[in-house]
Image (cartoon, rainbow, N blue to C red):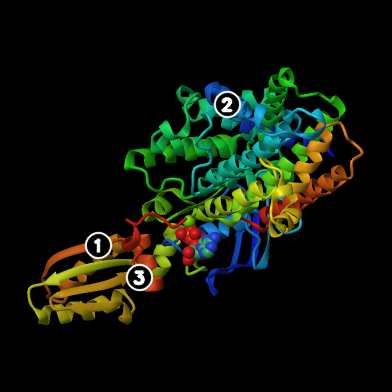
Amino acid sequence: MIHARKLSRNFTVKKETIEAVRGVDIDVPAGQLIAFLGPNGAGKSTTLRMLTTLLPPTAGTATVAGADIATDPAGVRARIGYVGQKNSAGEDYRVRDELVAQGRSYGFTWAGARRRADEVLDRLELAPFAKRKPGTLSGGQRRRLDIAMGLVHRPDLLFLDEPSTGLDPQSRADIWAHILRLRGEYGMTLFLTTHYLEEADRMAERVVVIDHGQIIADGTAEQLKQDLAGDHITVTTHDEADAATAAEVAARFARPDAVSRDGTAVRARVPHATAALPEYLRALDEAGVKAATADTERPTLDDVFLALTGRSLRENDTETPAA
Amino acid sequence: MSMKFVNDTGTVFVREFTPALREPLGLLITMGQPLLFLLLFGSQLDGAVAFGGGVSPWQWFVPGILVMMCLFGPMGAGYNLLIDMMGGAMERMLVTPMNRAAMLIGRTLKESVILLVQAALIIAIAMPMGFRLYPVGVVAGLVLLVVFGVGLGALSFVLAIKAQPSGSLFWIVTQVLMFPLLLLSGVLLPMDAAPAWLRAASVVNPVTHIVDAERALFAGDIADVSVLYGLVSATAIAVVGLVWGTRLMRRGI
Ligand SMILES: Nc1ncnc2c1ncn2[C@@H]1O[C@H](COP(=O)(O)OP(=O)(O)O)[C@@H](O)[C@H]1O
Ligand SMILES: [Mg+2]
């Protein structure tokens, strides 16, 4: 569905060059739900804007839905849907009028566009707001409208730029329910960006992590966590001598460099924490060490990001995203 | 012109026009604006300026008002585009396969339609007061105005695009440019009495040639050489505006 090679984009602002996207390679098979995860300013929107023909790349090539973004942008546009980071419907226009105009933009007849507008209003539970202007809708309703706009022409591939950012938890859950249901119904390929870790973790089949314009990890959330952060077990003992012995025992379960001791606490990275912990406790027993507390830790995608960049993604979770 | 281009232009035009139809009061006020102008300004005109040859001052004044309104309309189109760009509506349209030039022209057509209705109103009111109607000249004059309006509209889009992201450049340039263009064109007063440097500035102002052409056409002098100059000016503005505007859209906003 998407093949991008060395996709790059620079911006020049006040004589200074910003390398917003630096050599992105990405392949997305049809039907996948892929999340582009990265902090604000990582280059997510810029990548999306190149793939959707809104922005010509400074360098690199891409085919999207079978058409080349540089030589056949019209072909790309006809086959994809795009829900941008900002709201799609104009402020001065009624909800249904905008949906009809959107259908017309994709070559529907007036009658066809009106029929389809009513359909998507229904599908996204927006029918009661058909005659309202977007400014009178709640944040979650507005976002549903944006998604409705992106679906009018039943695209095979839908790009969503931060579909849930800025919404309250309930609206976020609601948006996700809609996205997942529509995906089931239409069998679309979904390419979305987010800076919410939990979303990428729970919803996406594949997570691509981007930072400073470069892809730094790519795989299922499970793979990434396993490969880059890993499970940990933590055991505390009553004194430091016991802890030293416990650390030696732990080295049998994990690579020696994956064991650390801090006072009476021993922490070890292991392949499967929940399975390893009982065995480890038995081994400690045999070695005559009494464990005071024992715990397992499953990694989060934040641990993955931390392992990759030395920074936490959560630090900028509260900011409003850059345009 | 392909069918798709016509369809796309129609789609954009209908989208632009629909909010006005949904709230017709604003539209009525816009349409009626020139009437107010005629009432306040025109009544002073009757006795004031003596034009040679017994020609009604309205013959001179009506095309002037129309050009003036044609200058202000496209600013509104640019403003609407600016709003659509600051939100995500323009971006959403740019992702569709719609024809890019149609996106610009469709937007300016709303101002053109309003202008034509206003023109019909003004002419209808001016006729009992001594304005003589030369139908062929008036139709040609209105076509010329629409071409000029589409060009100005496209240029105001260029400005709106360049004014991203804050939009302030749009206001600065329109405010700084509008009045000199208007006053130096002889729309409101004849330039004949102006000092030489003003007249020189007036000659390089394309609006001057449009005004002259409109006056010739509204007087029925279709073959007047000023019509040619006006046509060249209007076409040049339309071509520059549309080429520049579509190029900017292709380059990404
Ligand atoms: N139109 C633009 N002009 C100048 N700089 C831009 C523009 N768009 C994005 N950038 C810069 O490029 C970088 C990546 O931005 P963006 O792709 O929007 O990030 P993200 O969507 O991941 O938050 C940022 O540093 C941003 O400031
Ligand atoms: Mg973004």
Q: Which mark is residue B36?
A: 2
- Residue A68 in view of the camera: no
User: At numbered mark 1, what does the secondary structure look like: helix, strand or loop?
Assistant: strand
Find residue A145 and report its horizontal and vertical position in percent.
49, 35
What is the distance, in whole Å, between disc 1 and disc 3 at their CAs? 23 Å
Looking at the image, how many numbered discs can be counted on the residues?
Answer: 3
Q: Dividing the picture into quarters, in which one does residue B77 lie? A: top right
Q: Residue at x 18, y 69 (%)?
A: A235
- The disc numbered 1 marks a residue on which chain? A
Ligand 1 lies under 8 Å from the Cβ of mark 1:
no
Q: Which mark is residue B25?
A: none
Q: Earlier in the sequence, mark 1 or mark 3?
A: 1
For the residue marked with disc 1, what is the amino acid? Thr
Residue A217 as seen in the image, left or right of residue A47: left
Proximity of marks 1 and 2: CB atoms separated by less than 8 Å: no
Q: Residue at x 71, y 33 (%)?
A: B61
Q: Residue at x 62, y 40 (%)?
A: B72
Ligand 1 lies under 8 Å from the Cβ of mark 3:
no
Find residue B253 and report its horizontal and vertical position in percent.
60, 55
- The disc numbered 2 marks a residue on which chain? B
Proximity of marks 1 and 3: CB atoms separated by less than 8 Å: no
Q: Which mark is residue A311?
A: 3
Residue marked by disc 1:
A296
Which one is nearer the viewer's eye here, A210 or B142? B142
Q: Residue at x 14, y 70 (%)?
A: A236
